[in-house]
Amino acid sequence: MSTNSPLPASDVPKIRIRSCNSVGLNADGRFVLYWMTAFRRANWNFALDRAVDWAKHLQKPLVVVESLGCGSRWASARHHRFAMQGMAENARQFAQGPVYYHPYLETIAGEARDFFAALAHSACLVVTDDYPLPSDLDPEPWAADLPIQLEKVDGNGILPMNAAEKAFETAYAFRRFLQSHLREHLLDFPKANPFSRLKIPLLKRLPTEIASRWKPAKIAALVEKKCTLGYLPIDRSVESVELHGGIKAASAALTRFLRHRLPIYREKRGDAAKDASSGLSPYLHFGHISSHEIFRALARREAWTPDRLAEKASGRREGWWGMSQPSEAFLDELITWRELGYNFCRHRYDYASFDSLPDWAIKTLKKHAKDMRKYVYSFDGFESAATHDPLWNAAQRQLTRAGTIHNYLRMLWGKKILEWTAGPREAAEIMIELNNKYALDGGDPNSYSGIFWVLGRYDRPWGPERPIFGTVRYMSSTNAARKMRVAEYIESYS
Ligand SMILES: Cc1cc2nc3c(=O)[nH]c(=O)nc-3n(C[C@H](O)[C@H](O)[C@H](O)COP(=O)(O)OP(=O)(O)OC[C@H]3O[C@@H](n4cnc5c(N)ncnc54)[C@H](O)[C@@H]3O)c2cc1C
């Protein structure tokens, strides 16, 4: 066993790589292990690129283990099926390279750790995904006991998470930061095809003592609709939805969006009656598509080059990229808003707590916490869509049945939970539970951005001061009704 292993020449920017222990690599190991937990894709993936670099450098086989845990609070048939559809596609993709791919489904909460430990004993080193939310598949907490080097690689977004040293409190401040710092990172892209001309030895099977105990999941059979996933200890009452997971479905959704919806994105994104947004959030959440792939496709469409970037950071939403208005509006969501949430979760361990709100929001919500509420519903009342408001109930039913709600209605959905709950802390808890249990993109840093935006995060005080909300921004169902064909929507989710 050697220590302090030198980094191989790598195209992966150093700022995205984090060493989690001080142990060196095991030169006698049988393979390089990529323990995939978040960036579930065989392309456009810095963590995969890094593992490939190590395998090339050591001339060892590469083992990719994509793991899906069953111990998370919101593990359900809906989320599992979507992730497993991605695994089935990944199995096809990895078969095209000199890579041993092992889809792993945890069947008893916590057993992943034993599998990981067994693999680590045979590996030269481990590369894994650096995701800003805690996960019980994350090997970092186990790093102290590891006999070999563990590296985490950040493939979350266009701005490396380590480029910002603090959490930003407003989208404006973060946008200004991006406009000053993003330029250099726009030159670093993960590989679209990491296996091109790759020459490394291929591992045919895992060592017998591992393979006999932890068999690869029979993914192709498991993704069949008729398979109930009955043997998994997950919530099967949250059923799978029509939307299909995986990198192929994600790329197809991107192509459809760029062709048909992008032109109306800026004007119609807020219109719940129009399908103007990309629908990419579940794919981004499961790591089936990377923002780099999306950005590259958009830039190609615009025949864009970095010399079109504005010199000065103004913090304004449009004008910095030098792209068309719809593309700039889309990039503001994809990069500013999405990565703002990642930035917050990376720096604030209290990201899911009421006390993480800005002081003005805490103060005004506390002041109005005991205000009379005309309606107060319990968690069950909300979950079963049994409120007095047909529009809200329809949005809740869309969430439980389809795993999604249009962004505009999602904001209204949250604001009404605040209005009809005994207090703002309870409102936060109910939103977190419902969103993360049912939304296909739930359990993401942006779940917490959206939910806490409802309570004032990233926002400013708005007058007039009102009951319950204080100066937190208010939204009314009547206004929403004016903006969309409500009757039709309510009818489709009756
Ligand atoms: C109460 C509430 C809960 C939310 N929960 C989630 C969640 O669980 N997961 C989630 O990804 N988003 C969440 N959002 C943010 C937003 O609603 C979704 O990201 C967006 O509707 C996804 O649809 P799209 O992919 O078509 O977005 P598009 O408009 O096509 O945008 C492209 C991408 O940009 C990002 N994005 C867009 N809008 C936002 C936003 N407001 N904040 C942060 N990132 C954004 C998403 O990654 C999205 O996929 C929530 C918002 C609210 C108000």
Image (cartoon, rainbow, N blue to C red):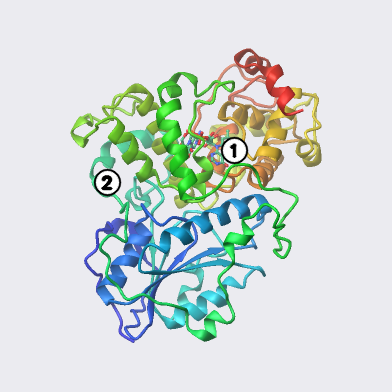
Query: What is the residue that sits farthest to the left in this orientation?
Result: 307
Pointer 1 local density, CA inside 10 Å: few below 14, some 14–19, many at least 20: many
Q: Is residue 113 above or below residue 448?
A: below
Closest to the camera, between mark 1 and mark 2, is: 2
- Image quadrant in which you'd find residue 193: bottom left
SS at mark 1?
helix
Residue 400: percent from the left, percent from the top?
A: 70, 40
Q: Can see residue 398?
A: yes
Residue 155: percent from the left, percent from the top?
A: 39, 53
Q: Can see residue 427?
A: no
- Name the foreground residue: 441 vs 66: 66
- Image quadrant in which you'd find residue 226: bottom right
Residue 340: percent from the left, percent from the top?
A: 43, 40
Check whether the beta carbons of the residues at disc 1 and disc 2 lie within 8 A of each other. Answer: no
Residue at 21% x, 35% y is: 305
Q: What number is the disc on residue 50?
A: none
Q: Is residue 441 left or right of residue 293?
A: right
Badge 2 residue CB within 8 Å of ligand 1: no
Residue at 68% x, 23% y is: 489
Residue at 65% x, 43% y is: 241
Label 2: which residue?
A: 185
Q: Is residue 3 left or right of residue 448?
A: left
Marks 1 and 2, how far apart at CA: 29 Å
Q: Is residue 305 left or right of residue 39?
A: left
Pointer 2 local density, CA inside 10 Å: few below 14, some 14–19, many at least 20: some
- Name the foreground residue: 342 vs 28: 28
Q: Identify residue type, mark 1.
A: Ile
Q: Is residue 305 left or right of residue 148?
A: left
Badge 1 residue CB within 8 Å of ligand 1: yes
Quadrant of image for the N terminus: bottom left
Q: Is residue 67 above or below residue 335?
A: below
Label 1: which residue?
A: 451
